[in-house]
Image (cartoon, grey):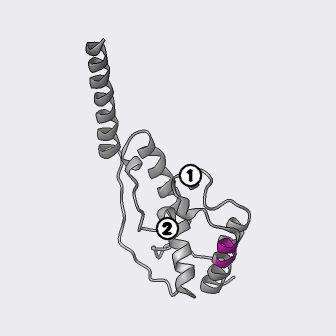
Amino acid sequence: MIRRFAVLAVIALAVVAVLVLIGNVAVAHTNPPVERTIDWDSPETEALARAACFDCHSNETRWPWYSYVAPMAFLVTHDVNEGREEMNFSSMRGRLEGREMAEKIERGEMPLAVYLPLHPEANLSDAQKSQLIQGLVATFGR
């Protein structure tokens, strides 16, 4: 019985090691240089944007531990790359439009529902969402 448990434990550890290796080798966790400095309307708006948006929409992504383990590594990296392509607070590419960002937050499209369980800081209250929306419009215009 103990021998069977030991064999299963070794197999489980080997599987985890392979998944971690794949997650580290096959997926590039990048944070390109920040090219743009934003003149935020308030420190509160910046803090809320950083909490709810920056991991996917900036070059300042905080890569969590699970982003280094396959298959999550592939999913997280895909979402970050797609988010940066759509809108990036750190890049000179593309326009940042306050009204468009506000509408996505108002409709509940952002932050993504799949992101929220592992990132409670991004799960904003209604008051925080309202403050972020007002701040984004004030910072980036309509």
Where is residue 95? Give x, y as percent: 57, 75
Residue 137: name its quadrant: bottom right
Does the magenta segment cover residue 128?
Answer: yes
Where is residue 82? Give x, y as percent: 52, 56
Q: Is residue 27 above or below residue 88?
A: above
How packed mark 2 is, by other alpha carbons closer than 10 Å (few <14, some 14-19, many 20 or more), is many
Residue 81: assigned label? none
Q: Which residue is disc 1 drawn over?
A: 117
Helix, strand or loop at label 1? It is helix
Callout 2 amino acid? Phe
Q: Which residue is disc 2 drawn over?
A: 54
Q: Is residue 100 left or right of residue 16?
A: right
Quarter of the picture containing the C terminus is: bottom right
The residue depicted at 44 percent of the width and 83 percent of the height is 37
The residue segment tinted magenta is 127-131
Of all residues, the one furthest to the front in this rendering is 2
Mark 2 or 1, closer to the camera: 1
| Residue 106 visible in rendering | yes
Callout 1 amino acid? Pro
First in residue order: circle 2 vs circle 1: 2
Give the Cα distance between marks 2 and 1: 16 Å
Where is residue 44? Give x, y as percent: 55, 81
The residue depicted at 41 percent of the width and 47 percent of the height is 66
Quarter of the picture containing the N terminus is: top left
Q: Are marks 2 and 1 in contact (CB under 8 Å)?
A: no
**Mainly helix, strand or loop, the magenta region?**
helix
Q: Is residue 88 above or below residue 70?
A: below
Q: Is residue 76 left or right of residue 24?
A: right
